[in-house]
Amino acid sequence: MLEREKLRREVVEFINTEERVPQNHLLRKIDAAVDFCNIYDFVEDLYCADNGRPSVDPVVLFKIVLIQHLYGIRSLRQTLQDIDMNIAYRWFLGYTLNENLPHFSTVSYNFKHRFTEETVSKIFEWILKEAARAGYLSPEAVFLDGTHIKANANINKKIKKAVPEAAKRYSAELLAEVNADREAHGKLPLNGNGGNPPKMKEIAESTTDPDSGVFHKGEHKKCFAYEAHTVCDKHNFVLEVQVTPGNVHDSVAFDDLYTKVTERYPEIKTIVADAAYKTPWICKRIFDDERKLSTAYKRPQTKDGNHEWWKYVYDEYYDCIICPEYKVLHYATTNREGYREYKSRSYICEKCPTRAKCTENAKCEKTVTRHIWQDYIEMAEDVRHTPEYKFLYEKRKETIERVFADAKEKYGMRYTPYRGLTQVTNWVRLKFAAMNLKKLAMRKWKTSLSFLKLSIFMPFNRINPSFAYA
């Protein structure tokens, strides 16, 4: 029997939004997982207590941005349009179907001018505290890596600019140990930067977003980008994030990130990171803090066709290097970068049968370097071969790599519509806060569902034995 379509477009109905939102809807789970009234404590100082017109509820403003990040909506304008037509979104905000929503520019202005970086950080940390209180965090082993986010800037709109090279965070400690090593070998100590002006380097700076940096790696197309250096636990909760320009190396951003996450979670025992973090300073800092670094094999940067690096053996007792032809390379000096230089005798090397595979130096002199903190690199190598830490490193693809994949594919973090380091940092923190909140809500909901099933199929006195004798 054919039935024609019914067009009832002007029917007036009474609707209860509470009944129209499914009980297993994501926003219901999130609403039950945390108390959003805590947000008032974070923003109270940003509003005048007794002057001005009534503001839009800050909880509503935060929930609007939360919806945008949860569902990967590209802009606040589109987010407000979707909320206007979605019953579940309106229910989550506490708005009726006919109630006017805040204008998107109001939401944008508050998160750009009123809600500071400190406010966003407080919200991010509050969600983590809720997850810790529920027992879902496991920070004993943390996974660290960085991912690039395409900036809102045209690669063709740039200028060349000369800037001084950034000084190393550990330069004072390194210089002290270099001078101690030089004095132990009878060399004069080095003074600061030697009286030389700081080295300059030429970079390409975007005229649209000067805070971004040029990113070009492998098959990736060259572009201006930011990098989110991120730490997560084994349950994929993001514990900390630091955003830098896209041309900042992972090892350079490590110090600030490591300091923040270890101060907040002193129980951390293992840092799991890729080979980019396998530098002498990073290894020294982690092992000196009585923690372990689980990392990958780092391929030595040697020339093809030359002797393999492992054929040059360090003799710790005599403090020298033995070459593949069993000749001695003697200590020469310790440079400012912390490398001991061991050099061969030219009158020996010029008659060497394998000199072409060793050096092309005009003086027939081979130089091999060894860092004064090389022992820490070797400690990291020992840890790498331990089954426990090898297993942890294999978990990277299920933890930090999965976090980045979800953030880009599901939550729209492949590129940012914002400009400026502060705004991009807030945007990334809010996105990871939304991901953490969703994970917390899903875990709480599954736990309550499991307990409900248990209570149905088991007698009450077996669930709580204390009531069996009441």
Image (spheres, helix red, strand yellow):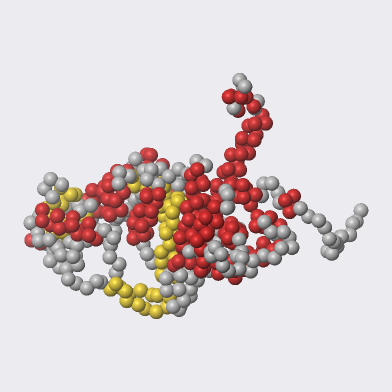
Q: Is residue 458 above or below residue 282?
A: above
Q: How many marks?
A: 0
Write the residue at 30% across / 53% down.
282
Residue found at the very far front of the displayed protein: 50
Q: Quadrant of residue 196?
A: bottom left
Residue found at the very far top of the displayed protein: 469
Tell me residue 312's x, y (percent): 20, 52
Q: Quadrant of residue 4?
A: bottom right
Write the residue at 50% across / 43% down.
133
Write the residue at 12% across / 45% down.
317
Write the residue at 37% across / 50% down.
263
Q: Is residue 236 above or below residue 216?
A: above
Tell me residue 310's x, y (percent): 24, 50
Q: Quadrant of residue 179?
A: bottom left
Q: Is residue 209 above or below residue 290?
A: below
Q: Is residue 445 left or right of residue 342?
A: right
Where is the C terminus found, in terms of image quarters? Answer: top right
Tell me residue 81's x, y (percent): 67, 66
